[in-house]
Amino acid sequence: MRKGIGILWILGVLLLGAGRGEGGIDSLEFAARRARLSALLDSSSAAVFRAPDGRTRNGDVNYPYRQESNLLYLTGENRPNIALIIAPGGVLIGDTVARVMLFVQRDGGGVATIEDGMTLDWSRFSEVLNTLWPRVDTVYASAFGTAFLEDWLNNKPLFIERDGRRELEGRFPNLKVKNAGPLVARLRVYKSAAEVENIRRAIALTGDGLRRAMAVCAPGAKEYALQAALEGEFLRQGATGTAFPSIVGSGANSLILHYDENRRTMQAGDVVVMDVGAEVEGYAADITRTLPAGGTFTSEQRELYAAVRQAQKDVLARIRPGLAWSEMDATGKATITARGFGKYWRHGLSHHLGLDVHDAGVMDTLRAGMVITLEPGVYVPVEDSLLAPGYRGVGVRLEDDILVTENGSLVLSESIPGEFTEVERLMKEMRGKKVPAE
């Protein structure tokens, strides 16, 4: 494997945005990504990516299709029956030595082409793979859609990915099969200008959705009414959907980190934790705001909220290239502890954000070009005996999306109000407003 990316990485940066339509990523950027991945390989290795099949929801109904993120990153193609092979040593196709091969099903719905390689019919994918295996000693493959299945009749798991790798390596003793994910993650962790723009757009739609949810947030309303208002606004403005199942947790449900039932009726005095995000061009937003169901926080809720908000500010002041991920956590927890709520800190402070809401990348040290979340929170159990009753059963989480820059950071979600006074003001303003028809 080659040690660096060098000139090809710089070329990719220079190509960013060239010929790109509004909100899109152009073919030159996808070609640059493939070139950067090729630079991480040598002539005796190759990378192979295959789109997962559609998944059945029930009967003959499928879930909406979503491409495997590494293949989406390298091609922009969000459909099944697509595969990509990158082989720096080349594969002989007819009279041509191909190093980048895109396989597509020619179904009349528009045929993808690539400028940096060869486009082949989907039916030839297995043929070319069988030509490739004896020519390389390492292949980096996209993960199976499912690593294992549960054989419930025999009460044992079937490890598809592991067994598939072993069978191929048994057929070709000199071949090693590795997961391509960590390799592509080295590229995905740095976001281009076009990627940041897509994330910004997803954040903007998320902010508009939250404002619309505030208009229907009131005692007596169902959690799903907020979800409907939020997600309806996403779709009205052209989002492809949600980046993950919307979390709308009121009352004691605000304590459940990944609550997704959204069926409870909100009551006076509740807080509502909304952890939500739109998806645009495959890119995710991940925003959390905590709302007072009645429009105004109690004094105890304000105290918890203020502690979480201060932790966010203290960490943000330190974000810069070179800062260790563990230092961010330590800073946030120190602020919460100093406010007397350290016992109620229950999760990590941050993660990468991009094509996946928990995006590819190692969480070790911050570097310029990363997009991360910043999400401190405190969660006081209903049965807690250390704090007064007004604090009990209250969860507060605030989450914003941050671009790490050369000199510090940029809050991509700064237009979404975060101070509790701003939240109260905006809720009062939004109530009674009608949702526009288009």
Image (cartoon, rainbow, N blue to C red):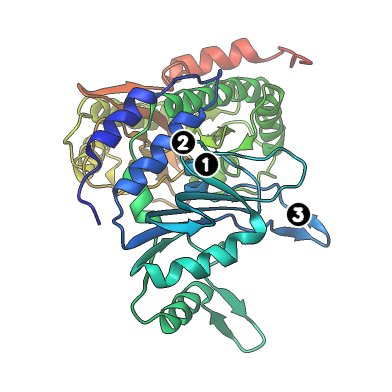
Q: Amino acid at mark 2?
A: Phe
Label 3, label 1: how far apart the Cα atoms are: 23 Å
Identify the residue under disc 3.
62
Q: Is residue 387 above or below residue 407?
A: below
Disc number placed over residue 75 in the picture, else none: 1
Which of labels 3 and 2 is toward the front? 2
Q: Is residue 388 visible?
A: no
Q: Are marks 2 and 1 in contact (CB under 8 Å)?
A: yes
Closer to the camera in the image, 211 or 51: 51
- Residue at image position (46%, 23%) is 197
Whole-percent x, y for residue 367 in the image: 23, 35
Label 2, label 1: how far apart the Cα atoms are: 6 Å
- Residue furthest to the bottom: 154
- Residue at image position (20%, 21%) is 407
Q: Is residue 413 above or below residue 102?
A: above
- Residue furthest to the left: 322
Please state, as top left, top right, bottom left or bottom right, where the N terminus lies in the image: bottom left
Q: Is residue 328 above or below residue 172?
A: above
Identify the residue under disc 2.
30
Q: Is residue 178 left or right of residue 422?
A: left
Please state, as top left, top right, bottom left or bottom right, where the C terminus lies in the image: top right
Q: Is residue 320 left or right of residue 121?
A: left
Disc number placed over residue 166 in the picture, else none: none
